[in-house]
């Protein structure tokens, strides 16, 4: 299979734009000073606050319930990613039937069966990445539950051991949230990736739209303003 003959120039441009947008946004939010003003980063401060309050409580049932709800949400998205992987693999087995249906639509550009299958494989990779992120996040929330159970009693709050445990638990919670966010980001970009099945031009537009929506939610949404106003 000669990949150079499969992809047109605009296909390569659109794919490079998709990858660059995903990687660039991830670097901006996760690894730059600008990202420290995002909604995700501000929520990490509340995780620290949460663990500080948890250490002062005699009964920590509410903390375990909060962690369980976060874990359940992660499990839902992990299951959804698995279903999406199965769906794309099923589509790979019915390429001719799907192409005959899609090819009859007036707004879909004609492509070869090989290129169609490569696009589906790319979508499968995106969903697989999301699944691994959600699955690891789920595991990390398991570890958080163990650390919540291992927290020393509130009368020991001022000891170095208690402060170290509080910080350790907050960091692990932040790590679980970070991997969850990356998995959800993959699902958002998967929506943009669907535009490629219609046209590489549409992939450029849908990727830009997803990028704009995610940026707005992290830096200019009502949720961001609400959290920032409390800091």
Image (cartoon, rainbow, N blue to C red):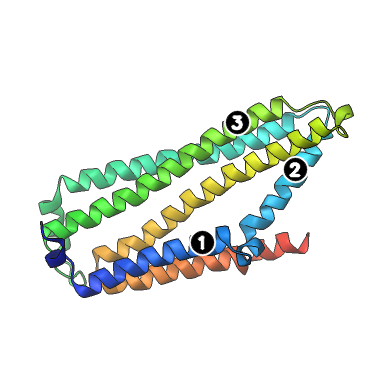
Question: Which of the pair 102/154 is nearer the observer?
Answer: 154
Residue 166, horizontal then vertical, whole percent: 75, 37
Residue 134, horizontal then vertical, whole percent: 47, 42
Q: Does any portion of residue 104 appear in the rendered image?
A: no
The 10 Å Cα crowd at callout 2, few under 14, some 14 to 19, many 20 or more, is some
Tell me, yes or no, whether the two marked residues, 2 and 3, touch with CB atoms within 8 Å.
no
The 10 Å Cα crowd at callout 1, few under 14, some 14 to 19, many 20 or more, is few
Label whose residue precedes the other's in the sequence (1 or 3): 1
Residue 120, horizontal then vertical, whole percent: 24, 53
Can you identify the residue that label 3 sits on?
A: 143
How far is mark 1 from mark 3, CA to CA?
26 Å
Would residue 14 be found to the left or right of residue 213 on screen?
A: left
Question: Which of the pair 213/5 is nearer the observer?
Answer: 5
Question: Which of the pair 11/165 is nearer the observer?
Answer: 165
Question: Which of the pair 21/63 is nearer the observer?
Answer: 21
Residue 204, horizontal then vertical, whole percent: 34, 72
The numbered disc on residue 27 is: 1
Can you identify the residue that label 2 sits on?
A: 50
Q: Residue at x 39, y 47 (%)?
A: 129
């Amino acid at each position: 299979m000669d990949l150079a003959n499969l992809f047109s120039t605009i296909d390569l441009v659109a794919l490079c734009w998709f990858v660059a947008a995903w990687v660039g946004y991830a670097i901006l939010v996760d690894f730059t000073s600008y990202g420290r003003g995002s909604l995700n980063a501000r929520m990490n401060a509340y995780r620290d606050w949460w663990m500080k309050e948890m250490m002062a409580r005699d009964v920590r049932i509410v903390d375990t319930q909060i962690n369980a709800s976060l874990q359940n949400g992660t499990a839902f998205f992990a299951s959804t990613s698995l279903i999406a992987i199965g769906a794309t693999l099923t589509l790979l087995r019915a390429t001719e039937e799907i192409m005959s249906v899609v090819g009859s639509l007036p707004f879909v550009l004609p492509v070869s069966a090989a290129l169609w299958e490569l696009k589906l494989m790319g979508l499968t990779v995106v969903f697989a990445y999301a699944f691994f992120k959600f699955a690891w996040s789920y595991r990390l929330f398991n570890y958080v539950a163990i650390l919540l159970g291992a927290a020393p009693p509130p009368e020991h709050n001022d000891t170095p051991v208690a402060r170290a445990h509080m910080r350790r638990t907050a960091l692990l919670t932040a790590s679980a949230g970070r991997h969850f966010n990356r998995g959800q980001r993959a699902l958002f970009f998967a929506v943009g990736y669907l535009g490629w099945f219609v046209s590489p031009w549409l992939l450029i537009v849908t990727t830009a739209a997803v990028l704009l929506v995610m940026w707005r939610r992290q830096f200019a949404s009502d949720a961001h303003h609400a959290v920032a106003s409390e800091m």
